[in-house]
Image: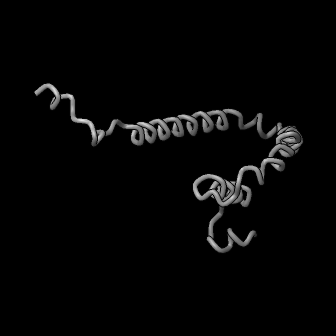
Amino acid sequence: MPWRQALLHIAIPGSIIGMLQLFTLLSPIQILLTKWVKLGCQLLIRYIVLLFVPIGVGIMKYSPQIIANLGPLVISCLVRTLIVLVVVGYSAHYFQRQRRIVSKPDEAEEGK
């Protein structure tokens, strides 16, 4: 178990923790400069197809179980997709709602 998982006592895969850490270092804090990681990112993007080989092999290996449980898998994927769409929609609506601009008067006040 990676030390970050042990320290935080969370059951999140190390790859997800690493991506969150990279995002934090690149975006808000800007400790890492984009030019420092650009070459490595270009290399990974060039060979990204190879990263999907294990997934394809796993799907071929377990295809009988996947076919046997196709109904519940499709339903659960649809339900989860709908839940994500609703949550993202409401969150975007909440964060993007119209707010008054302090420096401009209301339209009702302008007519007076």
Front-lying residue, 70 or 3: 3
* Furthest residue toward front: 103
Q: Quadrant of the N terminus?
A: bottom right
Above or below 56: residue 12: below
Q: Residue at x 74, y 56 (%)?
A: 15
* Furthest residue toward top: 111
Colour scheme in use:
one colour
Front-lying residue, 9 or 78: 9
Above or below 109: residue 45: below
Task: State whether residue 55 appears in this view.
Answer: no
Q: Residue at x 50, y 39 (%)?
A: 88
Front-lying residue, 79 or 18: 18
Q: Residue at x 28, y 40 (%)?
A: 103
Location of residue 62 in the rendering, given as x and y in whole percent from the top left corner: 83, 42
Q: Residue at x 66, y 60 (%)?
A: 31
Location of residue 101 in the rendering, given as x and y in whole percent from the top left corner: 30, 39
Report the number of numbered marks.
0
Could you tell whether 43 is left or right of 82 in the image?
Answer: right
